[in-house]
Image (cartoon, rainbow, N blue to C red):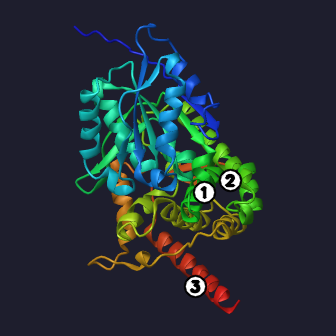
Amino acid sequence: MQHRYSVQVSWEMRLHFTNQTFALDNDCLLRVLSEGEPPPSQRPRRCLIFIDSGALAADPGLNARIHAWFAHHAEAGIHLAAEPQIVSGGESAKDGLAIAERVGRCCLQHGICRHSFIIIIGGGAVLDAVGLGASLVHRGVRQIRMPSTVLAQDDAGLGVKNGVNAFGNKNFFGTFQPPWAVINDAAFVALCPERERRSGLAEAVKVAIIKDARFFSWLAGHAPQLLDRQRPELLQQAIQRCAELHLDHITGNGDPFEQGSSRPLDFGHWSAHCLEVLSQHRLNHGEAVAIGIAIDCCYAVAIGALSQHECAAVLDCLETIGFRLWDQALHLRDAHGQRCIFQGLQQFREHLGGELTLAMPRGLGARQDIGTYDLQLAEHALLQLAKRSKQRIGHLTQS
């Protein structure tokens, strides 16, 4: 005898754009903490905060403003459960389960329950690692993400995934748990160094290529000004549209927990993840993604998915933003003479469960999935990209 039951769970995610979250007159976080079913009046909303060390270094007054904001709203029943916890940022934050275990210890020590909130301020790696801990404590404490980098605000801090690296594999341990809310604060972006600001724009170009031709045209047209600190509204517009496109896909494509093999938002990523490792993380994620986009756009020309003109428009846009589209790690070869970067295809296949499915453009603004990746065509694409990059370096040297 067999009985089959279906369990349906509806998740609601909140995305807010604001400036200076912890200014006393800013009620964005207050509204986020008050949304949904309010707890009984005798049970305050207690918050445990984790801060990326990099975000705190860029904004030394952040801790004091957090304390002042919570003191200001104490009568509303909103309290800090403990002194904000400082977490070392960067990809090393995702090395194993240490940070997730630290989150668990802090929650136990300070009596965090399922009616509490864990607020995470930081870059994508800290959001991932602390978010994993939050998703494991009591089978899931509500988390509020406050991304502090462009990459985190327009991509890494969005969505439903938490994870850390283990056994040489990226995001080997992880969970799916949507955040209670994501608060994108423009004040954090204003403090980011130029390299970090540029890095996040790779994800904007990526999603525009496969989702929104109009957005790509906007990015290409504004590429020379996107990092101009005198025109911060342009970068904010790019972040907002990129974030919207990512969340529209995650919430609307029918596979938020990645049960299938299609990964449209991973366009350009099979090589990017591998390239980060091959460069020993000399390249950050956005820089590797920019190269990955360039490789796949050149490949798309070879299979007739993009025209030469469309490919050139993408490469021009990325280079105008300031990305280098070739790296010495692409020259590395294994004992059989094959480029090491192609190991990324096998790693991606294993990640998908054995069946390779790669997102490719179908013109600008649309996508298709392919199940094979011809290495001869890929080699030709790499040679074309190397030639273009060499010519560009020569042109810049002469000028």
Left or right? Give the position of 271 relative to 113: right
Circle 2 — which element? helix
Q: Is residue 342 above or below residue 201?
A: below
Q: Nearer the viewer, mark 2 or mark 3?
A: 2
Q: Quadrant of residue 5?
A: top left
Q: Is residue 301 above or below residue 231?
A: below
Counting residues from the start of the chain, the first of labels 1 and 3 encountered is 1
Which residue is more in the foreground, 169 or 72?
72
Neighbour class for label 2 at 10 Å: few (<14), some, many (≥20)? Answer: many
Q: CA distance from mark 2 to mark 3?
A: 29 Å
Left or right? Give the position of 261 relative to 146: left
Q: Nearer the viewer, mark 1 or mark 3?
A: 1
Circle 3 — which element? helix
Neighbour class for label 1 at 10 Å: few (<14), some, many (≥20)? Answer: many
Q: Amino acid at mark 3?
A: Lys
Q: Is residue 335 above or below residue 59?
A: below
Mark number for residue 201?
A: 1
Q: Which residue is mark 2?
A: 235
Report the residue that reaches farthest toward the bottom: 398
Counting residues from the start of the chain, the first of labels 2 and 3 encountered is 2
Q: Amino acid at mark 1?
A: Leu
Q: Which residue is mark 3?
A: 390
| Residue 118, horizontal then vertical, whole percent | 40, 31
Q: Is residue 159 visible?
A: no
